[in-house]
Image: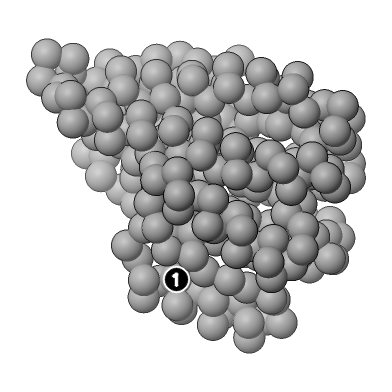
Amino acid sequence: MDVDLDGYSVLVTGGTRGIGRAIVQEFAEAGARVAFTYRSSTSEAEALVNELEEQGTDALSLQGDVADTDVAQSHVDAVVDRWETLDVLVNNAGITRDGLMLRLTEEDWDAVLDTNLKGVFNFSKAAYRPMMRSGGSIINISSVVGTNGNAGQTNYAASKAGIVGFSKSLAKELGSRDVTVNVVAPGYVKTDMTDELDDDTRKSILDTVPLDRLAEPREIAESVLFLASPAADYITGHVLHVNGGMSM
Ligand code: NDP
């Protein structure tokens, strides 16, 4: 995508794999300085930093759990210390712990809500002051499941629907500070998360997708890049559905 974000500093949570990795690469190709976080995939993180630096990108990897408030503050501080501003925050890190309600444990519920929703709160709160000073954009990754629901994913759907309400509220709080807050809600995307699906489930999903295929991570990343670009300066509180027509 032909977007010039030279001089922007960007922080992507969960940047080592899947959609997050594609987002990191998309921003790097647009000329931005890119920091990304991860929880345990240290070798992937090191390889990605090397790859980005070879391309001439100023890159930073940060290890820690997004559910930890102190970790989020220290990651945002590290970005601001290094590059002075934080222009774009992409809250991408997310997990699933699926199970029908009767079998879903409290631990499954807490793990998903803590990572997917509290993580978004933690990083947005840490980014609040730096972004209030110089403007910026926050882009949160939800899911078609947050809109449509899905049997076996009450915890995941609650976290992803929560992101929508959170983002619209924060968009109203931060609009006068020149900070936009938007959501990208992917359908099913080819990543480690969907590799776990069995063939029957995959086929039943494809039956509901008019474009008849899963998305490539890059196709989600391009929507994120658009929302962070000057072309989207007047868009806030929006949910951009990128789902091949699965939900209209
Ligand atoms: P992956 O499982 O491929 O990658 C997840 C990334 O998030 C990894 O970098 C992982 O790091 C990181 N991560 C996970 N938990 C934490 C944590 N507690 N703290 C810090 N980092 C963490 O996920 P996807 O790329 O598939 O999904 C990315 C986002 O897109 C998620 O929010 C997901 O819900 C959403 N989404 C995905 C869809 C899909 O079909 N794949 C569809 C709709 C939405 P590490 O490897 O170190 O744990």
User: Residue at (73%, 54%) from the top-left corner?
Assistant: 86
Ligand 1 contact, mark 1 (Cβ < 8 Å): yes
Q: Is residue 197 left or right of residue 236?
A: left
Instruction: Please say whether residue 98 is visible from this viewpoint.
Output: no
Quadrant (top left/top right/bottom left/bottom right) for the N terminus:
bottom right
User: Residue at (68%, 25%) from the top-left corner?
Assistant: 170
Q: Report x, y in % for residue 206.
A: 41, 30
Residue highlighted by disc 1: 45
Q: Report x, y in % for residue 204.
A: 32, 25
The one nearer the camera, 51 or 35, is: 35
The one nearer the camera, 5 or 75, is: 75
Q: Report x, y in % for residue 163.
A: 53, 25
The one nearer the camera, 109 or 79, is: 79
Q: Compared with residue 202, is residue 133 higher up or lower down, i.e. above or below?
A: below
User: Residue at (31%, 23%) from the top-left corner?
Assistant: 155
The one nearer the camera, 116 or 31, is: 116
Q: Compared with residue 162, is residue 79 higher up or lower down, i.e. above or below?
A: below
